[in-house]
Amino acid sequence: MRKITPVMLVLLLVASLMANIDITQLEQTEVIEDTGARSGADAELVAITSPKETQCNPECRNEIFVGIDTTFEVFIQNSGDQPITELGYKAQVWIADGNGNPLMLAKDATGADLEFDNPDVICDDVSVCADQSLAAGAVFKGGKTAIQYQGGDATWTPAAGIYVIQIETYSDQDVDPGNDVQQVYVEVVDYLDIEIDIAWDDGSVVATGEGAKAFTVSVMLNGSSDFITHNLTMEIDVTGDVASASGQDIADLKSATLGSLVHSVNVGTDQLVMVYQNESDPTDNLTEVRTIMSDDISNGVWTYTGSVLPDTSNTDAAYSVDVAIGGYSLYGQFESCIDTVLVNSTDAEGNPTTTEEIYANFCEESFTKDDITRNNADEVTGTLSTFHDIRISMLTVNQGYNSDGTGISTYTVGAGEPGDLSVGTSYVDASVEHRGSSVTELYDWNVSFTITNLDTSEVINVLANDCLQGVEPSYNYALLGTGPMAFDQGHACTMVEFDVGTYTIEAELIMGGKTTDQKPSNNVVSMEKEVRNNLPVISSLDLVTQGDLMLGMENMLEFEVSVFDADDVTGEGLTYAWVGGAESVPLAGCGGVGGIARTCATPVIQDFVTTFPVVVTITDAHGGEVSEEIIIEIWNDAVASDSTDDGITMDYSLTYFSKSPFTISVTDGDTNECSGITLPDGAGGELSGEYSPIAVIDYAPVTTYAANDVLAHSIDMMFDSGLGASSLWFTTNCKSSTLTQLLADGATNSEEDSTKSVLSAVLSGPILPAGQFLLIDAPLQAMEPPSASISGFSAAAGIGGDLTMNWGLTGTPLAGDKISVSITHSNGDVFEVDLDRTVVTYTYSGSSTTHGESYDIEVAVCNNDGLCSTPIGTATVVADKQVDNAGATGVSVVEAGDKWTLTWSATGTTDDVASWNVCYKNRDSFDAANMPTTCVNTGSADVMTADVMMSTAPGQYTVYFAVVPVDALGNTGTAASSGDAGADAAFFKANEGGEIDNNNTDGDDTSSGELPGWTWGAIGGVVVVAFIAGAFILSRGGGEGEDKDWDY
């Protein structure tokens, strides 16, 4: 067997490996789809802070009122490591279903989509964009920012409904679009607002001087939609130094409001209205007289008039008139109207059943306040001389600051306004103003804040008269009034840390100095609020480590979590706990407080192998916590090793998905069992020849793993270099080449032991099952076609039906090569013969052919492996054994001494006629089957005359003739001398003695005109001698000097 080229070795190895690839190994489930450390710019939309998400459990909070202009506020951060120089954002309002799933974009009043798209948030054009860059890690605008659109805040005036607000950032530089979008669920509801107002008829802010002072009270319905109140009451209270007071419905208003008494007045007009109606039976109803107020009555504005007369006996007389909403009822389908009825009946089988029927009836429901309470009361004041009064005009709580109180507010709620508070650092702010009759009268003041946690009874008391940070604009203390170093308005604030619970927040304005505040009732404002903890929001939990994860890897297992807490914007107060595995074991080196604990880097240990869940729990300063889980796959990594008694060592390196240890066993096998085997070539065929291993290793793994449970595996087979093994094979049946595969071809020197050699293989697919490894020392010879090939091939029909073939050879045929000839008959029979590799001609005998039949011929250079080279010789030849459809007729003989001339005519077709033979025999006639071989050929089909030379010997006998056609191959026709193509003529010649010898033996019994038998032998001998002599002469004349060849 000859050696193959290195290229062929490589092709064999690649083909073998490819043939054994298990397709399932390509079908890996990627648990972590998005990993990485966000290399580049990353415009992350951290959170939407306004509008707040509506939460119902079961009562709803953070609802939006219909028609109240709403803006969009967000936190945007560059979470990448490169600056952002191009940024846009877009806010959309989607109509949603009850589960919070967006359905379609909402429309504005003009029918346009509610979409606010601003592509010019950050750009390099200062005339277009207010900002040109956002540094890595920075928060846009330093905190919350309102979405801008067409030069101002994007503003939505909502209609009632359920919505999802979606806001997204976009940038061509963004490397992580997965954190660009946030959504909040909001409910927009109708609201009821009853506003009451009182004013002096003369337009004075504070009434002064003597005489009656007339006032007017106005009550207005300001809800988002029309509503009707039943028995709405307005309560009026006159206090202070008045001689008398009257109202439009009462002459002595003073007496009606003495002490704690108030005068109550129904607002509207009396009407007979429905106060109850059964849902299922409209005729079951109840009507009664109620005082009705609606937009249809005086255009929704009801007024009440009255007057007060100051008491002139007291020069410092002061007084006030206070009004407030009392209560009211509404008519509709309220929860209190629901009627549940149990109905007894029988089913189709006659069994008693009870069903529950619920009726949402119509009835009246009483209320003591509306949805917006800050305008439910008002007052006017008066005095005879100077009226001293300062008041708190507004009390608010501002939230959304950093834990140290820095930053700006993202949420504000005032006394009398709906809305809960969030835990965290807040500023309570009281706005104060001068309400006295003389603005030049200056007042010293302080605000006493009292914040009480009703759940814990903890009380915070603070006295303040300025607000240097937290609430804009900042304010330094000044007297209230008009004058140098005085302002008619001011505000005081204090920072408070709210925890979860119910709080009362009270501010009391205290007038300093000797002056007495004559209207102390407007110096105290309070509100009760529920403080709730906004849980941190985890926007992403990423695996930072790149590539496949496995036991023993050099890199650490690294995670990163992105979180936002509306109550702790910087996140420095958040606590991180990282655990992993089913037992939730704390991860080494991970966890802590503040931003540094957002990342976790821990080494991979054995317990992490296979499916490994990692959970990060984030706890805020108020005990609220959230968790996020990420599940990763970690591959086990092992090297199983064993040796045979003959000193062959096998190492099986395996990266696999199992916690179980992996081991192997190898023993020396019987080489005789696998002697003289064939080996595959990796392309579906076999190598040339037979092979016998010099070593057989019986192998068995402790278990097997499918391809999807194997990430990588390889084998090292180490043996004594003297063994001479050059290739490694694996088989489950060495007698079957289809169950045998090449693993490695070409041994290397061992780095550990110079006396050892190693055959190494990188495997694919499942691990190798139990089987045998074969060490082969013989060179691997591929089955290759011969290098020589057929050239100049020709094939033609020969005389008598022979098929004659000739060819040349390109290249040199080697030992083991042969010339294979294949001839296919028209009936499908195939004749095959193998010739010596040097033969260049072959004749297929006409005895095996049929005249007129075609034969397909192929001639190729082939070898013992059954492979043939190209090109091959091919041809189709028709066998030719006879002259078709032609003959001679009218043969005549003209005698002229020793030259007899025959003439004839052709009969039939002469297409196949190349010439004519005139055959003759003396004394005896002949039939077609026994034609004589003594003939004269005309040389042409067109020549139909021939001269036959007769013997000059004397005699008397008859000569018989026949004329037959001859084709180009030499095939001749047959004819009898007595037929149309035959003729005869008498021969007579007397001898000189006058006697005629009719036998004409000429002394050796040879007929006249014929040569004696011995003369043919003599002639043949002369020809042979002449041929040999000529060959000798030619061979000697072929060259000069010593380099001469013999020619035969």
Image (tube, rainbow, N blue to C red):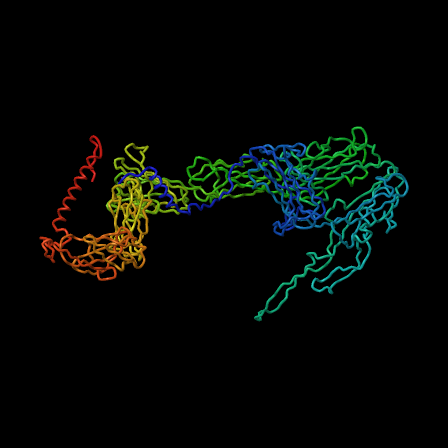
User: In the image as oriented, which residue stretches furthest toward the bottom?
Assistant: 350
Q: Residue at x 41, y 47 (%)?
A: 23
Image quadrant of residue 438?
top right
**Is residue 621 something that shows in the picture?**
no
* Number of numbered tags placed on the structure image: 0
32 up-or-down from 851: above or below: above
**Is residue 701 something that shows in the picture?**
yes
Q: Position of residue 232 (x, y in %)?
A: 78, 52
Q: Position of residue 772 (x, y in %)?
A: 30, 45
Quadrant where the N terminus is found in the figure: top left
Nearer to me, 147 or 469: 147
Nearer to me, 545 or 999: 999
Q: Position of residue 676 (x, y in %)?
A: 25, 46
Nearer to me, 71 or 20: 20
Question: Left or right: where does residue 32 sit relative to residue 284?
Answer: left
User: In the image as oriented, which residue stretches furthest toward the top?
Assistant: 484
Quadrant where the C terminus is found in the figure: top left
Question: Left or right: where does residue 412 sit relative to residue 325?
Answer: left
Q: Position of residue 531 (x, y in %)?
A: 65, 43
Q: Residue at x 66, y 32 (%)?
A: 126
Question: Left or right: where does residue 822 sit relative to residue 604?
Answer: left
